[in-house]
Structure formats: C-alpha cells, structure tokens
Amino acid sequence: MTEGKIIKALSGFYYVLSDGKVFQCRGRGLFRKQKVTPLVGDYVSFEAQNEREGYILEVFERKNELIRPPIANVDQAILVFSAVEPDFSSVLLDRFLVLIESKNIRPVIVISKMDLIDDETKPIIERYISDYRRIGYDVIETSITTKQGIDQLLPYLKGKTSVFAGQSGVGKSSLLNALRPDLHLKTGDISTHLGRGKHTTRHVELIEIGGGLVADTPGFSSLEFIDLEAEDLPLCFPEFRALSDECKFRGCMHMAEPKCAVKAALENNEIPSYRYKHYVSFMEEIKERKPRY
C-alpha cells in the first residue's frame, strides 16, 4: 500500500503524485457507500500494478476543503485582482477574503496589471494596497509586461499547496505562465461585450511551481456565504478580531451594541469605512439567507 496526493481528477480517474511519479487511479466502490468523493489535494493510500492501473483505497482526513472549486488541504489562496481591466473591486475582494478566512486558509493578495494604471487611478489603487497591508495582509503588486512582483511571489509558493483565484480576466493564467514559462496555459482576452474575462480553466489541477503545488482553478462558481453563520463573520475580518476583546460585550457583533471597539475605531478612521460597509452588507445577507432543511 502506497501513499500520495491527488493532483488531478478527470473523467473518473484520479492522478496521484507519489515519490515523484504520477499514478492513474480509480476510486474503489466503498467511497460511494461512505459518500466520500476524493478531491484534488487529498492525501490517499492506493495500490497500483503500474502507473496506469491503480486503485485508491483510503482518503485521509482533510484539514479543509472547498466545494467550488473542489479541492482539499489548501495552505494558502493567492487572490489575484487586477488594478484595471477589469477594475479593482474591494467588495469582491472582501467577499473572497471572508470565504478564505472562514476555511482557515491564508490569503495572499496579488494586484495584477500594475503597468496599466494611469495617474488618476494610481492613488486609488495605492490607498487600497496600503489599507490591506495595514490590516495585516500580504499584498504583492505585479505586472506580466514588466515582470514586476514575479520574483517576490515565487517564495510564497515553496512547500505549500496554493489556490490561485479571482475574478475572470484578471490574469491568473498569465501570472502562472510568468511564474513557470513552460506551462503555456491558455489565457483569455477580456470580453468587450460583457466587460469581463472568458473562463480559460476547465478543471482543477495541481501544478508544480516554485517548489510547491499550485491549483489553477476554474474560479469560484459560487461566492455565497452558504456555510458561514452570522457569529462567525466577525472572525473573518482580522482587524475586527484584533479589537473584539476591547468591546464591552463578549461575542459583540459590532452592529447595534454599545461601547463597541470596532465602531469606535471606525469613527476614528482606524478602520476603512468600506470594510465596515461590506461587513454590514455581508451580515445582512447571511441573516436573510433561507434556512436549509
């Protein structure tokens, strides 16, 4: 019995990396009985006569998993957001950050297409970058054209399983091609009719880059807070989490409660107003969510 990690799932086959070799495996029938579906990123035990004929015997316990895209045991999420084309969206970034924080996955923010910003856009983008760095996030400014930030990003990948995610058209595949030029991943142009990018990635696959494994995913097909409860949302905002002990009430939701340290920080301009606005919007969305039966 051998152990390895699933790096690709396609057409009923699971491709397992073990000791530098990739084995094509099928799942045993017991997974259907146990209602376990092997995911890319899973650590598994398997048996194989050769590299083309193997069977997965057991899926080991996961430290986390994402449903869309389907991947397990993620160490960090590289959230790629373009400065322009499409325009930078702080509300979309915050939505991604909350989803990633809720899974205890480390986020790294990458701002792409920095070479395309003009004099009017530059101070706006620089303010966002400053805000997120002050919160405690790593923010890397990149450009495929000038190669800015590529060498800075590479060390983050070493020894980690990373997910590249972000809005369509921000240049995820182009960035991966820059990090490992022999990949030749297909890239998509911005659709001028829709104003957004065309999806270029069709399945989840872990690729070796920079001494780690990187998932180029089809993107998050759902950005809804399906599994997130209202009381968990404050924990997904690091700057709120840091202040929560100073609130008068334990378990403060930072909404209507008196003597709330988060609202005091907001009034003193210590927290970006758009972050709190997004928090309130997300809280309302979670509370209005229809219960599942």
Image: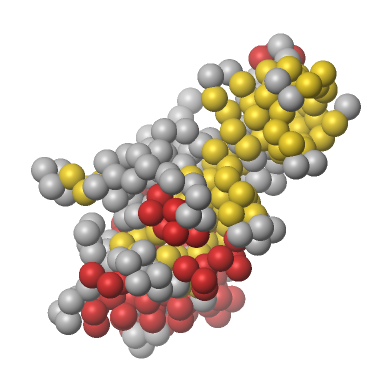
Q: Is residue 100 left or right of residue 280?
A: right
Query: In this picture, is 29 found above or below 174?
Result: above
- Residue pictured at 64% horizontal, 26% vertical: 14
Determine the residue located farthest toward the right in the rendered image.
1
Q: Residue at x 48, y 25 (%)?
A: 293
Extreme-front residue of the structure:
182
| Quadrant location, the N terminus | top right
Q: Residue furthest left?
A: 193
Residue situated in front as seen by the camera: 76 or 250? 76
Q: In the displayed structure, does residue 145 sit left or right of residue 215?
A: left
Q: Report x, y in % for residue 37.
A: 63, 25
User: Picture quarter containing residue 246?
Assistant: bottom right
Where is residue 274? Give x, y as percent: 30, 70
Kindly indicate the quadrant of the structure image that contains residue 19.
top right
Does 24 sit above or below residue 270? above
Which residue occupies the extreme bottom position in the image?
A: 268
In the image, 228 versus 230, the foreground residue is: 228
- Relative height, residue 277 to residue 5 (above, below): below
Whether residue 215 is visible? yes
State the count of labels.
0
Question: Residue 234 at what x, y percent from top left?
Answer: 49, 62
Task: For residue 103, say whether it is visible.
Answer: no
Color style of the picture: secondary structure
Occupied quadrant, residue 25 = top right
Please give the name of the residue rendered at 16% of the width and 49% of the height, measured from the top-left corner: 195
Viewer-side residue, 109 vs 135: 109
State the residue at coordinates (36%, 88%): 268
Residue 127, percent across and down? 31, 80
